[in-house]
Image (cartoon, rainbow, N blue to C red):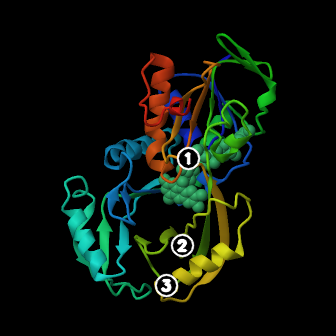
Amino acid sequence: MVDYIIVGFGIAGVSVTEELERRGKTYLVYEDSSQKASRVAAGVCNPVVLKRFTMAWRGGELMDGAISFYKGIEERLSQSFVDELPVLRRFNSVEEQNLWYEAADRPVLREFLSENILKNKNEGIGAPFYLGKVHKTHKVALSQLLSSYMAYMKAKNSLIEEPFVHDDIEILDNGVVYKGVKARHLIFSEGYGMVQNPYFNQLPLVGNKGEYVIIKSETLRLKEAIKAAFFIVPLGNDLYKIGATYDHQDKSKETTEAARDKILKKMKEVLCCEYTIVSQESGIRPTVRDRRPLVGTHDTYKVLHLLNGLGTRGVLMGPFLAKQLLNSIEKGETLEAEYNINRFA
Ligand SMILES: Cc1cc2nc3c(=O)[nH]c(=O)nc-3n(C[C@H](O)[C@H](O)[C@H](O)COP(=O)(O)OP(=O)(O)OC[C@H]3O[C@@H](n4cnc5c(N)ncnc54)[C@H](O)[C@@H]3O)c2cc1C
């Protein structure tokens, strides 16, 4: 008997699991490596929409809580996964510079956007219209964090690395039984894999494929992330992630030549250095029609719950939403209408 079964161990799954650990609950996690969004994500934790210089949904409010949540995981696992990583927005025109100045003057953005714009000092980057600096942004090394957490769970027999088969659940009034294990509650955090889940796949999860190109350049020597047409995110050892693309039609798992060409073409005038292409990665973002997360409890089966729809800013939203879901299950607190799945009832 455990308190919870969790299906899926990406950002949503680790957010729920860590929150359960902090509450002293027992759990069993199923993970089958069928989805990759959290594994390929650059892990940038940034509350500002850098296309229009606006605050992302709940952006400023969630930032401190998210970073301290991941630092708590660092303590639990005695490893480092979180680093401050300033983001430099490359301007395309004087008009964009003026929009930045206006945005930086708004109270909600003031603490995040630099008051002044900066001259580019890196010869590997072309930025004739200068750069704006976003403060307080971080990078979470998600793939390492997830692997380390899985090793931690494996050591205490809390992880099963195989596909969870929805047809094999027995639902009781006070819990579920799956493969002989009884749990008080079951939380699905399957990312885009939710489309196979008969209990929740009527919800409007759209999915949006993202691809990165990984390059190596010994001359680029970037310490910050750059946001131009795409992000350039330093990974260490002269490696950089460049992307990611957005494609809501192609839901295949393979990387594509079209995405690679698009990234390299758009970054031609930004990358003024020698580089080699090392690899390419892709994942499907679990995006939702109304661009809000999917959190809540099944209408009929009150022991089945969902944390999904983290879309494009999972690092920022995951910890907050996991806490809200568990408060609703354990304490009967009401979930906010904006992200409660009952908005689609
Ligand atoms: C290219 C790219 C770049 C991104 N960059 C960023 C970024 O820099 N910052 C940011 O905040 N967000 C970023 N995102 C978005 C972020 O990745 C998502 O918000 C987040 O990963 C979603 O996490 P999730 O746990 O809901 O889904 P997933 O990461 O897809 O995790 C779901 C997990 O469930 C498992 N699973 C599914 N079905 C089953 C089953 N039946 N049995 C067992 N296991 C199952 C899958 O294997 C998977 O591990 C990016 C996304 C992409 C694709």
Q: CA distance from mark 1 to mark 3?
A: 33 Å
Q: Nearer the viewer, mark 1 or mark 2?
A: 1
Does the image show residue 99?
A: yes
Q: CA distance from mark 2 to mark 3?
A: 11 Å
- The answer to which quarter of the image holds residue 62 is top left
Q: Label 3 amino acid?
A: Leu
Image: 275 above or below 184: below
Sequence-wise, the earlier of marks 1 and 3 is 3
Q: Nearer the viewer, mark 2 or mark 3?
A: 3
Picture residue at 30% right of the left edge, 69% below the top: 133
Q: Name the foreground residue: 210 vs 126.
A: 210
- Coordinates of residue 45 in the picture (x, y in percent): 43, 55
Does the image show residue 141?
A: no
Location of the C terminus by quadrant is: top right
Image: 338 above or below 270: above
- Circle number at residue 288: 1
Disc 1 crowd rating (10 Å Cα; few below 14, some 14-19, many 20+) is some
* Secondary element type, mark 1: loop
Sequence-wise, the earlier of marks 1 and 2 is 2
Residue beneath disc 2: 240
- Coordinates of residue 200 in the picture (x, y in percent): 66, 33
